[in-house]
């Protein structure tokens, strides 16, 4: 692991802090192997996908690539994090393994490097602990640290790390992850979904059958695009249209289920548009929208 003092100036750090304050939402994690959008008590900070067309952000990304001696196109979009009192990120690795690798790495490869920059100091707690190294890095404004997630093709468990709880004040950082190949999150998702489409269709179909039967279910952790298409086709069946118009409880269950997938898709798109250079949208769960309904009822049937 390398430490670099004054990687960013105090002024650059303040500009980034303003960006994070202007647009952040609760951080998510990879859970259950594949779900990158899960909000859990393993990580309680807030996240901001930085605008990659901003001149400062572009300059910093280029400087990181030079420091790591990596092609710029292999870098994920820069991500800012805010930790307020009582918030933390429990021990974790930055590389993907198992089912998570299949979902997030089919096009881009795994994460090879992480570089993290502290944007402020003066708060209490909030160090970065590396338990396998017996080391805690104390934040200093502008300091960067970086480490390998892979070396010679092997995953590096020794860099397991933890964002220690902030006891007082606020902690701001920027994190930069780098891949084996050119980073393309959309292609990672597409290749995974192509391989999982049959399974996703079966799960969503089963869920819709349960919703029809009066059982409330939650969205699957992935496959939002496929699921939303299936839900739309389902709602356009004349018998389903008729029931949506007459059974408010059924309509509410289906609306909630659809809204969860819409939110999942929005999170995936926000993670990608930071790379494409558009400021990410504020992350808020969407108001449920009832799928479009044709007007010719027939006898009920289930898909």
Image (tube, rainbow, N blue to C red):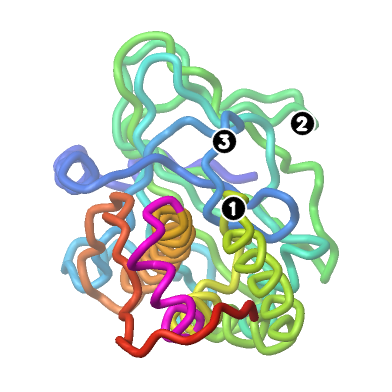
Question: Residue 40, how many percent across, how many down?
Answer: 57, 36
Measured in 3D between alpha carbons, the distance from the residue under mark 2 to the one under mark 3, in whole angstroms, is 26 Å
Question: Residue 103, how many percent across, how many down?
Answer: 68, 72
Question: Residue 124, how many percent across, how many down?
Answer: 40, 10
Q: Callout 2: 10 Å neighbours few (<14), some, many (20+)? A: few
Q: Which residue is mark 3?
A: 40
Of all residues shown, which one is farthest toward the front? 299
Disc 1 vs disc 2: which is toward the camera? 1
Q: Earlier in the sequence, mark 1 or mark 3?
A: 3
Q: Which residue is mark 2?
A: 133
Q: Secondary structure at mark 1?
A: loop
Q: Secondary structure at mark 3?
A: loop
Q: Examine the rendered structure and indicate whether residue 9 appears above or below residue 103.
A: above
Q: Seen in the image, is 114 located left or right of residue 295? A: right
Residue 271's label in the rendered image is none
- Is 248 a magenta residue? yes
Disc 1 vs disc 3: which is toward the camera? 1
Task: Determine the main secondary structure of the stretch shown in magenta.
Answer: helix
Range covered by the magenta-colored residues: 234-249
Q: Is residue 71 visible?
A: no
In depth, the one of 266 and 1 nearer the eye is 266
Q: Which residue is mark 1?
A: 214
Q: Residue at x 43, y 27 (%)?
A: 139
């Amino acid at each position: 692991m390398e430490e670099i003092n004054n990687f960013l100036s105090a002024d650059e750090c303040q500009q980034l802090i303003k960006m994070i304050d202007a647009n952040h939402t609760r951080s998510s994690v990879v859970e259950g192997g594949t779900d990158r959008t899960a909000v859990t008590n393993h990580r309680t900070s807030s996240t901001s996908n930085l605008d990659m067309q901003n001149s400062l952000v572009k300059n910093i990304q280029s400087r990181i690539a030079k420091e790591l001696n990596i092609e710029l196109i292999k870098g994920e979009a820069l991500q800012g994090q805010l930790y307020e009192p009582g918030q933390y990120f429990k021990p974790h690795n930055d590389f993907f393994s198992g089912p998570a690798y299949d979902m997030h790495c089919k096009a881009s490869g795994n994460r090879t490097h992480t570089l993290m920059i502290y944007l402020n100091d003066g708060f209490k707690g909030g160090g970065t602990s590396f338990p396998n190294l017996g080391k805690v890095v104390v934040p200093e404004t502008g300091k960067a640290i970086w480490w390998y997630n892979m070396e010679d093709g092997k995953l590096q468990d020794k860099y397991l790390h933890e964002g220690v709880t902030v006891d007082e004040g606020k902690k701001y950082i920027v994190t930069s992850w780098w891949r084996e190949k050119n980073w393309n999150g959309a292609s990672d998702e597409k290749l995974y979904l192509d391989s999982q489409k049959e399974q996703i269709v079966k799960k969503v179909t089963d869920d819709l059958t349960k919703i029809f039967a009066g059982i409330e279910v939650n969205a699957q952790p992935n496959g939002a695009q496929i699921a939303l298409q299936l839900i739309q086709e389902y709602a356009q069946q004349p018998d389903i249209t008729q029931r949506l118009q007459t059974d408010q409880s059924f309509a509410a269950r289906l609306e909630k289920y659809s809204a969860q997938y819409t939110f999942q898709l929005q999170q995936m798109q926000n993670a990608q548009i930071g790379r494409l250079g558009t400021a990410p949208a504020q992350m808020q769960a969407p108001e449920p929208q009832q799928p479009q309904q044709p007007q010719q009822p027939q006898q009920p049937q289930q898909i």
